[in-house]
Image: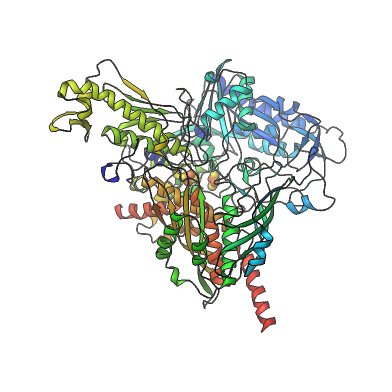
Amino acid sequence: MASWGEASQSRLIGKRITRLSGKDKVTGKAKYTYDINRPGMLYARILRSDVAHANVIDIDLSRAEELPGVKAVLPIIEVGKKLRYQGQEIAAVAAETDDIAKDALRLIFVDLEELPFVVTEEDALAEGAPQIRDWVGNKSNPGTNEKGEVEIGFNEAAVTVEAKYHTPVQTHVCLETHGNVAEWTDDQNLTVWASTQAVFGVRDDLAGRFELPANQVRVITEHMGGGFGSKFGAGVEGRTAVQLAKITGQPVKLMLTRRAEHLVAGNRPSMTQHVKAGASRDGRLIAYDMRGYGTGGISSGAGFQAPYVYSVDNIRTERFNVTINAGNQRAMRAPGHPQGAFAMDSLMDELAEKLGMNPLEFRRINDPSEVRQAQYTLGAQEIGWHRRNTIPGSGTGVKKHGIGVGSGLWGGGGGRGTQARVTINADGTVEAVTGTQDIGTGIRTAIAIIVAEEFGLTPTDIAVKVGDSGPGLRSGGSGGSQTTASVAPVIKTAAEAAIQKLFEHVAPLLQAPVDDLRVGNGTIYVASDRTKTVTWHQATGLLGMESISEGGNWDQELRQHGVAGTQFAEVEVDTETGNVQVIKIVAVQDCGLAINRLTTESQINGGVIMGLGQTLLEERIMDPLTGRMLNANLEDYKVPGTYEIPEIKSIVFDTHRKVTGVGEPPCIPTLGAIANAVYNAIGVRIRELPITPDKVLTALAQKKHKEVSNG
Amino acid sequence: MSEKDKEQKQGKNISRRSFIKGVGTGTVAATVAPAILVGDEKAAEAQTDEAVASAKIQLNINEEVTEIEVEARTTLLSVLRDGIDTTGNNVDLTGAKLICDKGECGGCTVLVDGKPVYACMMLAMDAQGKQITTVEGIANGDDLHPVQEAFIKHDALMCGFCTPGFVVSSVALLNENNKPTIAEIKEGLSGNTCRCGTYPFIFDAVETASQEM
Ligand code: FES
Ligand code: FES
């Protein structure tokens, strides 16, 4: 049975290894799509709707076309069609410089007939609201789920909680905006540098749309500046860049502006839950009744997990999708999970309090995961769970501390569909090639580690080529935390096959059977007689004019699906300013076999910080009067900066030696942990994210008011 | 760029200005009410009119003098990334990134006379006579700066798109204060944004680098 071997036998796997791309990234040499400069390259921009809903009456491109330096102007929407959200594409220009392209956009004249719009869930659901899609109402047909008898559950419940939880729309904020550089080498061959999470996905998408055989489209993503789920297809901007390059016969660069990135390049849908839940006296969660909805903008897909993580006997849920005039949702880091986790973990604490039970104890009773049970112990110890306020809000002073816990789960087991080739050349060089892409997770380095481990070399000895469809070695998109678990088994089996081939060359020289050969540190030796050894270069020198080049196959014994995680947060709430400062997060993350512990820890940090942003800072704000997003920039749309960063103690919790992805799961438990810590600090619950100072101050004022009127 | 191309470009600038002036007096077609015109003639005119005034300037970038023709509106960042010098070579210093275009993210940070500056917020013309150091000029040939070494060691980068900005800001911070506390590191780097969440390891890297310097 295939295996990664014992930890004690690994030289590299599971250790902390610095990234292969590190030097290029710290010196500015790393070339992202945005950095590609091609001879004769044009700069393209897209004119976008500045209104939420309108009929297009007329588009006049003529003046833009006449502007010197403009090489092409392309309508994107047809006259007579509807614009359905702010930011929707109207037309594009390609010009000699970016500034000329900018000028040209101002010379495109568009007559629009504005239509009534809705940009908030409330407005969309209001009686008499304008129905913004002709083919279906603003509210989708609800999906329902039922298990057990929820009414019986409530009858038996000793305590019940009824609450409404809400998380707003969050945007991905990829620092490299979506974009492409398109170049036709001739009218049948296209090369596209794409900022994407799916090199082959973009290739196939463009091949289909431009009616080319797929192998005549080459997509390159050497480095990319963040995707978080939003960068899979070529997108309107990708197709536009290719079209403009075709019209002009010149390479075209088209990157979205920061504003467009917020408006049209995806977002995490909102969530609103009206939930009622009940628990028995002995702390079992026995009834859960939820009615909820979310908006994914003009598209559907606003799903979320409810209930989440914990077992409930009797469940009834109903959820629907609300359409509004705003940009489409796209998958965003653990789609549906963080919002579900926030509501569920808040609810769990509310129930525990009514039961007079320690919230951790209440979780232990209801959490079916053995892994998380172990993690609770570890995390509680690390954060100092005993230090929490047994009576929430009972701390003294202006700055109050609190501690909370949250949980999450994810899949990340990978799948078939990756082809790879590992090559050993006579000069001793080694190449590993596959069509995956490094979106910042460090898969390039993970590949090098696996090959180097098999060959007795160091990771820097391995030339890893990813992010290029040119070699025709397909791999899937980087989504669902599936990359490592999809790629690693294929690379490992390819490397195993290659080293076997090399052993066959070496065996006669060492006068030993192939199965008695082993790799050492840059050597190959005979296991039964360690004095018989050759260096790596002596061995590869035997290849003469040949190279060894082997493929691999996905072996599901080498990976595992399903990870559990739990996090503990300590916060400090300033009761005068309302500011919440997260002091510490303990993230106990089930990781399986972490190929590279260093980059795994980076992933955990990154997830926690994105979760923190969603909890405390991030919110797309739509103006119901103008239909526009009010914070489509990095000043008013707050993402975590240096001041917000707590101490993060990441505990790589590896229960087995099989590979699993962890790109997404660490962003999930953070929300509940922080929200519960805030409650523990101030004794008032904030059920609507983000937990901003105004909400904290309002909550504190209401609490005081209640105390005064009760007292 | 060839001599002919250059002339053409200059010629185009002139005709572009008069062209814009020309359309500026034009009238807009009648529209169905209520209607909105997305195009903005006045803004286009004003912007372009002012912007096309161009000049040849010299910039000292990474200890090399680059001569380049810029418009008044050309930012230092666009010279670094997209500029073509008067000998026709791409400047091609693409380490500094345009991320927010508004002085909000620090992705475009370069050193100007040793001080960190957002290159998206500085006009190229204002950078004349100053020493500009980009991330490409931080290492000494193949010898990485201690900040760069420490960033690699601590994995203070994931996608790496923000990294050049953080590296330059960290160098600037340590040049000012070579033994910063964690609070001072946070303050010194508060003008930079990372979406991947590399901050904790960036703080570690700056601490390590400060010990090396
Ligand atoms: S691009 Fe210059 S500060 Fe953001
Ligand atoms: S490393 Fe990706 S944005 Fe900082």
Q: In the displayed structure, does residue B26 sit left or right of residue A611? A: right
What x and y, as percent, mark residue B90?
A: 48, 29
Residue B46 placement: quadrant: top right
Number of dots carrying numbers: 0
Q: In the displayed structure, does residue A222 sit left or right of residue A424? A: right
What x and y, as percent, mark residue A559?
A: 42, 40
Residue B185 placement: quadrant: bottom left
Q: Which residue appears at 36% of the width and 49% of the height?
A: B154
In this rendering, the answer to whether B16 lies above or below A6 is: above
Q: Quadrant of the C terminus of chain A?
A: bottom right
Outermost residue toward the left?
Answer: A531
| Residue A370 appears in the picture as rendered | yes
What x and y, as percent, mark residue A306?
A: 62, 53
Q: Which residue appears at 51% of the width and 29% of the height?
A: A37
What x and y, as percent, mark residue A517?
A: 21, 29
In this rendering, the answer to whether A224 lies above or below A74 is: below
Image colouring = rainbow
Nearer to the camera, A646 or A456:
A456
Nearer to the camera, A577 or B64:
A577
Q: In the displayed structure, does residue A418 sit left or right of residue A54? A: left
Q: Which residue appears at 58% of the width and 62% of the height?
A: A285
| Residue A648 appears in the picture as rendered | no
Nearer to the camera, A262 or A668:
A668
In this rendering, the answer to whether B8 lies above or below B125 is: above
Q: Quadrant of the N terminus of chain A?
A: top left
